Amino acid sequence: QLQLQESGPGLVKPSETLSLTCAVSGGSISTNSYFWGWIRQPPGRGLEWIGSMSYTGSSYYNPSLKSRVTISVDTSKNQFSLKLSSVTVADTAIYYCASHRYSGYDFQGFASWGQGTLVTVSS
Amino acid sequence: SSELTQPPSVSVSPGQTASITCSGDKLGNKYACWYQQKPGQSPILLIYQDDKRPSGIPERFSGSNSGSTATLTISGTQPMDEADYFCQAWDSSSNYVFGTGTTVTVL
């Protein structure tokens, strides 16, 4: 059973870069067919997918965030990371890391989730 | 980009059946997933590829998808099923899109 755990600053200033890491345990991040993604949820609101990446480097990003998002995978540490640049108060949300098998039409849902971490954008 | 619309709320009596809809353009031509989220917790995958349940998900949760509407059905609803529910689908332009969410109240 995969376990995911987010870590990173809980407070980021406007115009700066939000950086989060997700540690994976109970399995290898280098597993074929697995993708590693980020999803966010503003307090009291719905879910928004940010992007996903496989250990081979295949990546997919939400078109509305693509210009500001970078996701990377570190196989040596069995973890993956999110960077979101030029943040504003609208980026305040609970950020979840999650995993899914396959991508596109064969997608099998985000089956494993981290507990989530609240990131507040404020000066 | 694609949008997935859900009713904001659904009420159901214990033991009865709750149906939650998710509407989107040609949704029946895509696979739908469903998630349950309780307050302060991470979402849990209930259904993937329209009607498949991950291991550990009770049989009272079932899914269907046709035309422009995907439906999550909770049979024999229990008080523990009170939660928010989100649908999700993959779209070639928008990738992974979530629905607007439905709060299920068990009265």
Image (cartoon, rainbow, N blue to C red):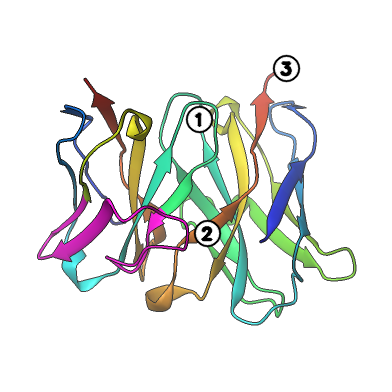
Q: Which residue is mark 1?
A: A42
Q: Residue at x 54, y 33 (%)?
A: B41
Q: Secondary structure at mark 1?
A: loop
Is any part of residue A73 visible from this angle? yes
- For marks 3 and 1, give the CA distance: 18 Å
Residue B50: x, y in percent?
27, 65
Q: Which residue is mark 3?
A: A123
B19 with respect to A52 (left or right)? left
Q: Secondary structure at mark 2?
A: strand
User: Amino acid type of disc 1?
Assistant: Pro
User: Amino acid type of disc 2?
Assistant: Ala
Tag 3 subunit? A
Q: Secondary structure at mark 3?
A: loop
Q: Residue at x 24, y 37 (%)?
A: B77
- Residue A105: image quadrant is bottom left
Q: Is residue B53 magenta?
A: yes
